Image (cartoon, rainbow, N blue to C red):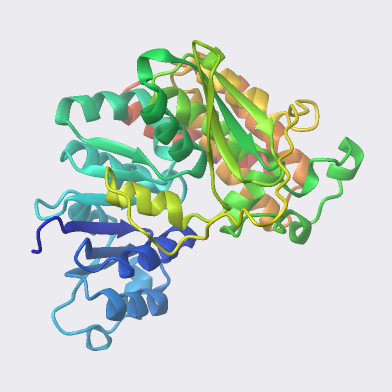
Amino acid sequence: MARGERRIVILGSTGSIGRSAVEVAAAFPGVLRVVGLAANRDVPRLIEQAWLLRPRWVVVADREAANTCPRSELPPGVELLVGPEAVVEIASHPEVDTVLAAIVGRAGLESTWAAVSAGKTVALANKETLVVAGPLVMERAKQTTAVIIPVDSEHSAIFQAIQAGGRPYLNRVILTASGGPFRNHSPEQLAHVTVEEALSHPTWQMGKKITIDSATLMNKALEIIEARWLFDLRPEQIEVVIHPQSVVHALVEFVDGSVIAQLSPPDMRLPIQLALTWPERHPGPAKKLDWSQVLRLDFEPPDLDRFPALRLGIHVATVGGTAGAVLNAANEVAVDAFLRGQIKFSQIVPLCRRALEEHPFESHPTLERLLELDIWTRQEVCRWITQ
């Protein structure tokens, strides 16, 4: 292994973040060496990535999909592993330095937990891990000396700004939100939003689930919760501002009133690269701002009546306990139901609120209890939808 070369695995390599991570890794031979790729079902794309990066392992988590992945189609020397347990195995393997956790949703919890438990550097794109089990994950990281570096553009921006201003002097953080495609819609208009409209994000190209979350602003609610645990903040230290251009990704205010912001075009390759190469910085494939052009930056407070998901995020960040696991599970089920045409766009957040109100709240749950409530919530919300 060349000096300074980091051995990484990319979990969720065929998703939108994973594909960008593959592109970043390919741009840094001698700096980043991908030793493992893991996907759920997209076998053709996984095979393409294997030929590009020549990892030691590829993992297909879905056993049925794995049957469509002949070993003969993989490059020589690449080992095929199958099942969710194989994802956990490579995330915690002793020959791995850094794990990019980019599996979407609650499904990424076990592998991220395994990487943290093994003391890895974790480039965290799976915000749901901290939404569901933030206090447990951060405590585990302290015990194992694992390093968690955020990949979400907003949390990466906070991470960078804190380095510049100093954590002891931090006063508050401000997460920016584009507002999605419906930031000027009335409640009546929101009741008639179609799937196609909700999937048309004005500034970011993302997977379907996070695109819908961006349209409801549930993604920002989840990011409030993530920031609460990741940076050890009080809920009142976290605010949200609407910024349609998606150029300023977050702002950090320090006790003297100085505010440091991180700016870049809406291109996830930059925070991915930063997380994988930190504390070094290298010229990379991400877009750069063109300062020869007029640049307008608008900011406005969010309308909590139009986007009630933000209230849920503030509430969950405040009460902690089992609330995060329940909110995340309810949202995943509700978003899937909307994409399937089973519910209206305007029903997503009320279903999440109902789950929070009706679940048996516990303030200090174990990981096992959180997983139990994840299942309970999914069953209950599915039942409500089909009633």
Q: Say if 272 sits above or below 174 in the image.
A: below
Q: Say if 242 sits above or below 207 in the image.
A: above
Task: Write the residue at 50% across / 44% down.
Answer: 153
Quarter occupied by residue 364: top left
Query: Farthest bottom residue?
Result: 72
> Foreground residue, 209 or 334?
209
- Position of residue 79 measured from the top left corner of the image (x, y, whole percent): 17, 73
Q: Horizontal placement of 60 versus 382: left or right?
A: left
Q: Quadrant of the C terminus?
A: top right
Task: Write the residue at 62% across / 35% down.
Answer: 176
Task: Write the residue at 31% across / 59% down.
Answer: 10
Q: Horizontal placement of 56 versus 326: left or right?
A: left
- Position of residue 193 measured from the top left corner of the image (x, y, whole percent): 82, 51
Task: Write the residue at 70% across / 51% down.
Answer: 338
Q: Say if 180 sits above or below 283 in the image.
A: above
Q: Quadrant of the N terminus?
A: bottom left
- Position of residue 227 measured from the top left corner of the image (x, y, whole percent): 46, 28
Q: Is residue 358 visible?
A: no
Q: Is residue 202 visible?
A: yes
> Foreground residue, 293 or 16?
293
Query: Farthest front residue?
Result: 292
- Position of residue 144 measured from the top left corner of the image (x, y, whole percent): 15, 31
Quarter occupied by residue 40: bottom left
> Foreground residue, 57 or 299?
299
